[in-house]
């Protein structure tokens, strides 16, 4: 069952899905050309919402097409050997038919996707919604569409928070010397280097053993993932809620695959993606303070994790310390796009 989202955010997101409608009855167009199975790739696995959204999408498409379009999810980026940064390339090579991307994982190939990783650009979900539901989101979809894929819905992996095994992190100097894992993208290396930490890039598959052995001191991921994968049992006893970057999700279909579908089935695939994305966003945000629901933070505390929520002034100290990284990467993303995003965020948070 779809969980309830805060009224304004949910209404805005539903407007983004409006008009997709239900697919018309199947026509003979393309009959006999459909594959026995369509492979859908996603990093991680259930129960994290990003992965659950992929399973929901696959189930909806399979059921509502009466089995004409059978979609199977391959979690853990297993079609690319666990290297989630290769999913876009694999789609263009025909290895993957559909995917739910994390924007972080495709940002090394699509520079504009680094927008979501500009440190402290997006302080809360109002700004995030303004991006994915506005002109900037449309601009980003147009960019991605030039890479032989068809983006069909925005999802969300969540704001990325910081955990570690050593001590409370409340100010920039608290990060000095900590070995922090990041998933992908040179911007993350520069952010943590600028804060005095020692950043280490590794896949999600390698993260848990690295935490358990002490090869890294900490990591940054959404709270829902922290809880789902019991990182509290991997010596991660300190969690800082700083919302330093957001990680968007994108539901995509290979251009070749999408063009092989009958028009009515294309509509069906898109409608199912948007429905799954709405649920994914709601699940991602559950318990993170929106609408007063703090159950995720409370669960962390019950597990013995010390949760530190930064004040606006404390976040500003981190933003100031990472400003050189922001300015450099804003040029990489493209200043017109960054300025358009800043204007949309300002309007949404005024």
Image (cartoon, rainbow, N blue to C red):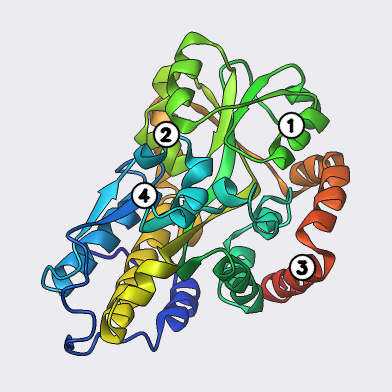
The residue under label 2 is: 82
Position of residue 115 relative to residue 305, above or below, is: below
Q: Nearer the viewer, mark 2 or mark 1?
A: 2
Q: Is residue 4 above or below residue 167?
A: below
Task: Report the Cα–Cα distance between label 2 and label 3.
Answer: 34 Å
Q: Give residue 41's mark.
A: 4
Residues tagged 2 and 3 counted as in contact (Cβ below 8 A): no
The reply, left or right, for residue 170 in relation to residue 99 is right
- SS type, badge 4: strand
Disc 3 element: helix
Q: Is the Cβ of the residue at disc 1 closer than 8 Å to that at disc 4? A: no
Residue sitting at x 34%, y 56%: 53
Identify which residue, 115 or 98, lies in the foreground.
Answer: 98
Query: Considering only order in the chain, which callout, 1 or 3, is on the residue closer to the N terminus?
Result: 1
The mark nearer the N terminus, 3 or 4, is 4
Q: Residue at x 33, y 71 (%)?
A: 275
Q: Residues within 10 Å of mark 4 (few under 14, many from 20)?
A: many
The residue where tag 3 is placed is 342
Q: Observer-nearest residue: 202 or 119?
A: 202
Q: Which quarter of the figure has residue 178? A: top right
Q: Quadrant of the C terminus?
A: bottom right
**In whole angstroms, how far apart are the C-alphas of marks 3 and 4?**
32 Å
Alpha-carbon span between mark 3 and mark 1:
23 Å
């Amino acid at each position: 069952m779809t969980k309830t989202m805060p009224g304004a955010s949910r209404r805005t997101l539903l407007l983004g899905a409006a008009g997709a409608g239900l697919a018309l009855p199947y026509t003979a167009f393309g009959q006999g050309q459909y594959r026995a199975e369509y492979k859908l790739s996603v990093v991680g696995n259930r129960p994290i919402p990003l992965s659950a959204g992929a399973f929901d999408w696959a189930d909806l498409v399979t059921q509502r097409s009466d089995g004409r379009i059978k979609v199977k999810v391959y979690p853990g980026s297993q079609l690319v050997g666990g290297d989630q940064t290769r999913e876009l390339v694999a789609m263009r090579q025909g290895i993957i038919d559909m995917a739910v991307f994390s924007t972080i994982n495709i940002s090394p190939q699509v520079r504009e996707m680094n927008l979501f990783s500009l440190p402290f650009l997006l302080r809360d979900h109002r700004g995030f919604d303004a991006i994915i539901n506005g002109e900037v989101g449309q601009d980003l979809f147009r960019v991605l569409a030039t890479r032989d894929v068809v983006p069909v819905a925005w999802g969300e992996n969540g704001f990325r928070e910081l955990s570690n095994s050593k001590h409370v992190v409340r100010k920039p100097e608290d990060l000095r010397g900590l070995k922090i894992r990041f998933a992908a993208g040179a911007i993350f290396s520069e952010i943590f280097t600028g804060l005095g930490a020692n950043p280490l890039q590794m896949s999600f598959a390698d993260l848990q053993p690295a935490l358990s052995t002490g090869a890294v001191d900490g990591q940054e991921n959404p709270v829902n993932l922290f809880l789902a994968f019991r990182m509290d049992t991997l010596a991660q006893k300190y969690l800082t809620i700083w919302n330093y970057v957001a990680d968007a999700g994108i539901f995509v279909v290979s251009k070749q695959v999408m063009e092989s579908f009958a028009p009515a089935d294309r509509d069906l695939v898109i409608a199912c993606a948007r429905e799954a994305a709405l649920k994914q966003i709601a699940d991602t945000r559950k318990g993170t303070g929106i609408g007063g629901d703090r159950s995720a933070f409370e669960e962390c505390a019950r597990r013995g994790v010390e949760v530190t929520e930064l004040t606006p002034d404390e976040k500003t100290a981190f933003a100031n310390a990472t400003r050189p990284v922001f300015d450099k990467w804003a040029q990489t993303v493209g200043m017109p796009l960054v300025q358009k995003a800043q204007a949309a965020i300002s309007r949404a948070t005024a």
